[in-house]
Image (tube, rainbow, N blue to C red):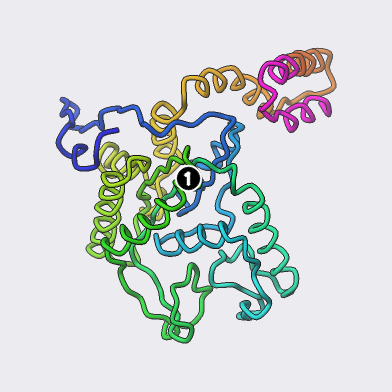
Amino acid sequence: MIRIRDYYLSYSTTLDFRTTLPFSQSPFQLHHRQSVLALGSCFAEHIGQRLIDRKFGLTLNPFGILYNPASILGSLRLLEAGRPVERGELFQHQDLWHHFSFHSRFSHPDAPTALEQMNASITEVHRNWEAIDRLILTWGTAYAYRHLGQDEIVANCHKLPGETFERFRLKGESIVETYTEFLSRLKKDKPGLQVLISVSPVRHLRDGLVDNQRSKAVLLLAAETLSQELDFVHYFPAYELVLDDLRDYRFYDRDLAHPNSVAVDYVWDYFRRACFSPEAQAIDARIDPVLRAARHRPFHTDTAAFRKFCTQQLEKIAELEAQFPFIDLSKEKQHFLNG
C-alpha cells in the first residue's frame, strides 16, 4: 500500500474541483476464516460492525470505545495476559461502578455485575488469543488523561472532575517505541500476524481546531513510522478519505465532528476493495443477497408468496452452509424459519 506521505503527492485533480485518493490494494488481507481483533475509536465501531455483519470472525472493542494509542496498547496487554479485573480496581461515581480501562457501557449500579461483565469480556478474548492473527487499530486522538492519584493513563474519565486528571499530548516517539516493542514480540509468537492502523476522521472539536490537527499529525506520523519499520504493520487511509477526498461538511453529521453514513459507506467500500482477499470478496458476493433478504421487512407475512420467499432463502442458506461451513448464517436461518 502507498505510504502515508505518498497520498499527498499522488492525487488527481479533476474539473469538478475534487482530489480523489488513488486506489491501492493493501498487503493487509482479510478472509472469513481468520480471527480478527479490532480496537479503537467510535469510527472503528462502524467498520468493525460491518465486518461482523458480513460474517467475519471479528471481536470488536472488548473494552468499549478507546481513543488514544496508549489506552489501546494497554488494553492489548491486558487481553494478552488475561488478567481479571479485581474488585478493588472499581470505583463508584454518580451511582455507578466504573473501571478506568473500560468504557461506561460496562459500568453498572451493582459492583459485582460490573465486575462480571468486564471479566467476561477479557476472558472471551484471552481464550481465543492464540488464534488471533489480524489486528485492526484505529487511533482517535493523541491527547490522553493521566489520573493524578494513581499516576496512570486512563481510557475513560467517567465524568470525574477535571482536576482529577492531567491532560497531555502523547509524543510520537513514545507511541512508536512502545508499539514497536509490543508488536515485535507479538509477531514472534504469531508469525502470521498482520496489523492495520488507521487514524479516525472524527474531529475532536473540544480540543480546538488547531490542537485537533496537531493531535492527528502526531498519530499520522507515528503510524507512518511503524509501517516503515515493521513490515507486518500497514496503514489504512480512513482519515485522508474523509478529510481530503470527500472534504465537505455534507459528509458530516449535524455535530460537524462525526462522518455521516454516506462518508462511512465511502470508506467501507474502499476498505472492502483494498483489504478483502479474493476469496473473501467472492464469498461476500455470494452471501450478500441472503443478508439483504434478511433485512427486508415485508408488509404481509401471511401470504403464500412470502412463505415461498422464505423457503427459497432457506435453500440458499443450506447451499452456502454446505460450501462455506465456516460462515455462520444461523441468525438468518432462524429469521426465515420464523417467517
Counting from the top left corner in percent of width and height, residue 98 is at 61, 73
Residue at left 30%, top 44%?
227
Q: Residue at x 59, y 38 (%)?
A: 52
Residue 92 part of the magenta-drawn span: no
Query: Which residues are the magenta region?
Result: 316-339
Q: Nearer the viewer, residue 249 or 290?
A: 290
Nearer-the-camera pick, 13 or 26 = 26
Q: Which quadrant is the C terminus positioned in?
A: top right
Q: Is residue 41 above or below residue 281?
A: below
Q: Quick one: quadrant of the N terminus?
A: top left
Residue that appears at 25% across and 28% down: 22
Helix, strand, or loop for circle 1? strand
Mark 1 crowd level (few <14, some 14–19, many ≥20, 10 Å Cα): many
Residue at mark 1 = 135
Could you say where residue 151 lies in the image, as x and y percent from the top left? 44, 81
Most distant residue in the front direction: 188
Give the vertical position of 12 relative to 159 (above or below).
above
Amino acid under label 1? Leu
Q: In the rendered image, which quarter is residue 288 located in?
A: top right
Q: Position of residue 290 (x, y in %)?
A: 66, 21
Magenta stretch, main secondary structure class: helix
Residue 27 pos. (x, y %): 37, 31
User: For residue 35, which quarter of the picture?
Assistant: top right
Magenta stretch containing residue 333, yes or no? Answer: yes
- Residue 33 is left or right of residue 307, and the answer is left
In the image, residue 320 above or below residue 56: above
In the rendered view, does 274 fall on the left or right side of 305? left
| Residue 316 against residue 12 in the figure, above or below | above
Q: Nearer the viewer, residue 219 or 245?
A: 219
Camera-nearest residue between 300 and 292 = 292
